[in-house]
Amino acid sequence: MELWREILVDKAKQNRDQTVIDRPNEDELRKLTEIGRLIATSLSTDEAFEEFARLVKSLVPHDRLALAALTPDFNHVDSVFVSGIEVDQPNASQRVIIPHGRIKHQMFVDFQQYHAVDDELNELTELVDDEKYRIAAGLRSVLSTPLIWNGEPQGVMTLRSLDPKAFGLRQRMLANEIGRQIAGSVAMARQANELRRLAEEQVAIAEIGRIVSSNLVIEEVLASFVEVVRGLVPFDRVVVTAFDEDLNEVTDVLVDGLSLEQETIGISYPLPESKIQQNVILNQQTLVANNSVYQELAARSVAEVQRYNIGSRSLLMTPLVWQGRTVGTLNLRSKDPQAYGEHQRELAEQIAAQIAGAIATSKQYALLKKESVERERLSKQNDTIAEIGRIVSSTFRLQDVYSQFAEEARKLIPFDRIVIATLNPDCTIATDVLVEGEGTKKTVGKQFPVPGNVRELALRNHDPLILNEPDYSKEILPKYPLERDQMSAGLRSVMIVPLVSRGVVVGTIHFRSRENSPYNQETASVAAQIGSQIAGAVAASEQFESLRRSEELLRTQVTVFETSADSINILRPDGSIESVNDAYLKETGYTREEALNQGPGFLRPPGQDAEYEEAWDTLSSGRSWFGVLKSVRRNGEIYPVEHSVTPVFDDDGEIVRFVGIRRDVSDRLQAEEDRAARMRLDVENRELAEIARQREEFFTSVSHELRTPLTAIMSFADILSRDRQGTLTGLQLEHLDVIKRNSRSLNELVEDMLDFSRLGTDRLKLDRSDVEVHALVESVVESMEPTIRAKSQQVEVVSAPVPVWINADSGRITQVISNLMANSSKYSESGSNIRVELELINDYAHIKVVDQGVGISETEQEEIFTPFFRSKREDVQIQPGTGLGLAISKTLIELHDGQIQVSSIENEGSTFAVILPVTSHK
Ligand code: ADP
C-alpha cells in the first residue's frame, strides 16, 4: 500500500516536472512576448538590443550572446549583435563563413539546436578558427539556436557560458521559444537589408563610373577603384589586366592584396594559353571557381598553384568588354572557399562594364597623346561624364538628377529634344520622366505602351540605336506613325539609348535632332557611357524611395500581424494559405509547415460545405465577408469562429490576396448560453421556491386543522379508556384501543406531512446539542417496545465499547431511528429478530438497524429514499404507510452532515445504516 502510494506520488511529480520542461511558465511567457514585440518594432537600434539581451539573460542565463543573420547565399552569417564577455579575437569580421558538414546540416537543414560542451568545443576549433579565442576567454559551453521563419533558416542565436552545465533541456526549450519570437523580425530585417544593400551597391557602382571617368591617369583611377570594389565584392587579391589589340600581350595594370614577389604592375607578358583564360577572353564569359573547383584549376597551372599555396581558395575572373572587344580582365581571389556566388558574379560584371571604357580610353588616349585638340576634347568629355556620375550619386531626388543630367549631356551630345522614360519590369509600359526641347508638348508622367513605339527597336539588344536620315524617313516613319509628329516638328533623326542596370533595361533616353546625321559610333559610345551612369541611379533611387516608404509600413504591419491576439491568415486568390501568424497556429493546433499551402477546405468540418461556399462566393466577387463559421482543429474538435475576410486588389483591380482575421468564439457563445441557462434556472428556482412556500403554507394550515380535532379525539379516548367508573365492557375497551392506535398513526402521518412540506424550504431547522448515542438508542428501543411486542418480535442491542458523542438534534435523530425500527417491524414476519448495532469507525458513529424481513430488491433500493415511493410487493402494500419516512430521514441525516445507507437481500432482510460524525472526544 505504502509502496504503491510512493510510486503514484513519484509519477505525479515526474509529470509535473515534465510539463515544467515542456512549456514556459506565465512569467516566461510574458518575457517571451515582450522580446517578440521589442524585436519586431525596433530591430536596428542598439538600445533595443541591450534590452533584448537583458530579457534573454533573465530567461536563459549566459555569458555571451551573438545574433547573426544568414547571407543570401546561405554560406555565411552576418553578425547583427553581440553582447556579454569580450573575446580577444584578432581579425574578427562582420561576415563569417559557416562550415559545411554536421553543424550546418543540423541547424539549417534539420532545424535543430546545436549544443556543445568542453571537449566537443575543441572539435569545433577545427572547423571555425575563432572558436579557440572563445575557449581562451573561458567559455565552456555553447547553445546555437537556428532562427526559422516560414520554413526557411534566417539566422542563428548563439549563447555561450562559462558554466558547462548552463544549457539544460529547459534552457534549450526557452532558447527555442526566443528563436521563434525573433525569427520573423530577423527575416524582415534581412529582406530590408538586402534591398538596402542592393541600392547601396548601385550607388557604389555609379561611384566607380565617376572615378574612372574623372581621371585619365589609369593608375590613379585604379587605386581609388580598389577601395570601392572592396566594399562590393570580397577579395584578398585583385588584378586588372589589359590586352593589346591583337590579344597577344597582357599587361597587369593593377595588382593589390595577396601577391607573389615577382609580380609588379606594368609588366607585360604573352597571353597564357590556359583554356580557362581563353574562354573568359574569347567567349567573354565570367569564370567562378570556388573551393574544390578552384583547387583543380590551380593544380593545372604553375602560376595558380603558387597562389593556392599562399592561401587563395576561390577565383572570379570577368572580361572587360568595350564595344564588343575584350580589352582586359578583372580577377578577384579570396581565401574564403565560398566567396563567389551568382550575386558576386553579377556585381563583378557591372564593375567590369564601368572600368572597361576607362581601360580602353586610356589606351586610346596614350595613342592620341600628341594631338592636343583631340586630347582636350577627350578630357572635357571625361570631366562631363564625371560630373554626371557625381550628380547621380549625390542625390536621390530623381527629378533633380534628370534635369541636371540633360544640362550636362548637352555638352557631349547634340540634340534639340531629349526624353527620358522609365520602363515597367516587363518593358511594356514607358513613363516619361523628363521631356525637354522642341517637338510635341511636355508629357512628364504620361504612360505609353512600348509595342508600336519606336523605342521597342532599341530594347532588342542593349546598345544605343541610331536612326539618321534618310533611313529615318524611309524605314521608320511608315512603321511608326507616332513619329510623324516629330517629323512635322522638324526633328529628323533620333538616337535611342537603353538604360541598363544589372542586366535589366530600366528606361530609355531619346536624343532627337533637326540635323540629318548628327549621330554616329562615337556619340553612341559616349551616350552608352552616360547611360550606364544614370541607369544604376534610376534603378537604385526607385528601389530606395519605395524601400524607404515601405520599410516603415512593413515593420508596423509585421508587428500587428505577429502580436495580434486574433488569428490572421493570408490567402492566395485560389484560397490556399500563403502565411499565418502565431495566434492562428495556437488556435488551430497545426504547425506552420502543416498549415502553409493548404487549400480552402483546410479547416472546414464535414457538412459545412454550403456555408463555406456562400462565404467564398461573396469573397470571389470582390466583397468582404463577415460571419461565424464552424472550424475544425487539428485534434478534431469543432468550434465556432468569427471571420472577417477582405480581398486585396492590385492596381488592375484583380484580387491578389485575401486577408482573414479569425477569432475562436466558443467561449463567448458558451458564456452567452450559460448566462441564458442561468437566467432560466433562476426563474425556475424562484417559481419552485414559491410553490414550496405555498405548499408548506397549505400543509401547515391543513395539519393545524387536523391536529386540533385529533388531539381532542386522542385525549378523550385516553380519558375514556382509563374507565374510572368501571362501566365499560371488554369489547368497548378494545374499540377504544383501535381509536387510540389509529389516531396515533394519523398523528404520525400529519407530522410526516408537515416535515415533508418543509423539505426544500429552509424551515427544517435543527436544534443541536451534544448527545450520547447509546442513551439515545436505549430510549428509542424503549419507546418502540409496544409496537414490537405487538408482533412478538425481539430487539437486540449491540453497543460500542466506549461512549459515542454526536452533536445533533436528538429529537430528529430519535425520529429517524424510530422510523427505521418501525419499518423493520412492519416489513418483517411476526416473531422475527431486530438488531440495533452501534459502532465507532474512524470518527463516525454507525447506527445500524438490521432485520430479517421481506428485503428490498436491488432496483427498488435506488428508489426507497424518494418521497411517496413504496414497494410494489403485496406484503408491503398491505401495511399502512405513506412512502415519506425514508425521504424525510435522509434529509434529516444529511442536514447533520451524515449519510444513510441501505443493503438488503430480498426475502432475507435489510440493514439500514445511519452514519454521523462524532464530536471531538469527551
Ligand atoms: P413507508 O414505510 O411509509 O412506506 P418509508 O419511506 O419509510 O415509507 O419506506 C419506503 C419503502 O421502503 C417502503 O414502502 C418499503 O417498500 C421499503 N422499506 C423501508 N424499510 C424497509 C425494510 N426494513 N424492509 C423492507 N422494505 C422496507
Image (cartoon, rainbow, N blue to C red):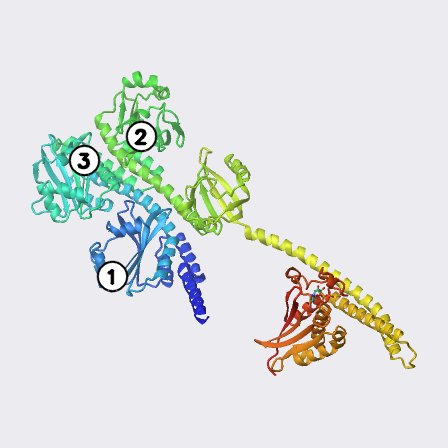
Q: Nearer the viewer, mark 2 or mark 1?
A: 1
Q: In the image, what residue type sits under mark 1?
A: Val
Q: Is 695 rendered above or below residue 275?
A: below
Q: Nearer the viewer, mark 3 or mark 2?
A: 3
Asked if the beta carbon under badge 2 is closer than 8 A to the nearest atom of ligand 1, the reply is no
Asked if the beta carbon under badge 3 is closer than 8 A to the nearest atom of ligand 1, the reply is no
| Numbered disc 1: secondary structure | loop
Q: In the image, what residue type sits under mark 3?
A: Leu
Residue 771 seen in the current view: no
Q: Which residue is mark 2?
A: 509
Q: Which residue is mark 3?
A: 320
Count neighbours of disc 3 (C-alpha within 10 A) and say few if under 14, some if 14 to 19, many if 20 or more.
many
Residue at position x 30%, y 49% from top?
108
Count neighbours of disc 2 (C-alpha within 10 A) and say few if under 14, some if 14 to 19, many if 20 or more.
many
Q: Is 363 rendered above or below residue 194?
A: above
Q: Position of residue 867 (x, y in %)?
A: 71, 63
Q: Which residue is mark 1?
A: 87
- 751 lies left or right of 348: right
| Numbered disc 3: secondary structure | strand
Distance Cα–Cα, label 1 vs label 3: 43 Å
- Toward the viewer: 276 or 22? 22
Residue 324 seen in the current view: yes
Where, quadrant-wise, is the C terminus in this rendering?
Answer: bottom right
- Toward the viewer: 767 or 506? 767
Contact flag, marks 1 and 3 (Cβ < 8 Å) = no
Among numbered discs 1 and 3, the one appearing first in the sequence: 1
Distance Cα–Cα, label 3 vs label 2: 25 Å
